Amino acid sequence: MEEAAHYRFPPAAAYPLNRCLKALKSDRAFAERFVKDPRAAAREHGLSEDEARLLDPLDRDALVARGAHPYLVFMAGLRLKMLREPGKMELF
């Protein structure tokens, strides 16, 4: 009996989305630009208007359905929460 894979690799078409999520997670300057103007920041990564709408606020299930890596969605969400609500989370 063959079981379904627990993890599905993102499709190539989701590369810009995952690259944007990685930038949100890792690049503080980009994340700060995103907080100020999410649509403009999403355009920097060539995302569609639909993808940009899913990023603000982060719609985890819809992003993963489009091929976003769950880890990147989670970590990007933490970075944004830290920027939007300073003092509520310890920096790590």
Image (tube, rainbow, N blue to C red):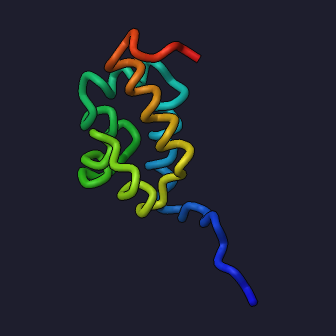
Residue 57 location (% of width, % of height)? 28, 40
- Identify the residue at image location x=48%, y=60%: 67
Relative side of 79 to 71, left or right: left
Q: Which of the two residues, 87 or 80, is positioned nearer the viewer here? A: 87
Q: Quadrant of the C terminus?
A: top right
- Identify the residue at image location x=53%, y=37%: 22
- Identify the residue at image location x=47%, y=40%: 21
Q: Which of the two residues, 52 or 72, is positioned nearer the viewer here? A: 72
- Identify the residue at image location x=32%, y=32%: 41
Q: Quadrant of the N terminus?
A: bottom right
Residue 65 location (% of width, % of height)? 42, 63
Determine which quarter of the picture holds residue 77. Answer: top left
Question: What residue occupies the far front of the structure in this picture?
Answer: 88
Is 6 rendered above or below residue 84? below
Residue 14 location (% of width, % of height)? 48, 57
Residue 59 location (% of width, % of height)? 33, 49
User: So how many labels did they put on this image?
Assistant: 0
Question: What residue occupies the far bottom of the structure in this picture?
Answer: 1
Is 56 rendered above or below residue 80? below
Determine which quarter of the picture holds residue 50. Answer: bottom left
Q: Which of the two residues, 39 or 85, is positioned nearer the viewer here? A: 85
Question: What residue occupies the far right of the structure in this picture?
Answer: 1
Relative side of 9 to 89, left or right: right
Relative side of 52 to 7, left or right: left
Is 37 rendered above or below residue 90? below
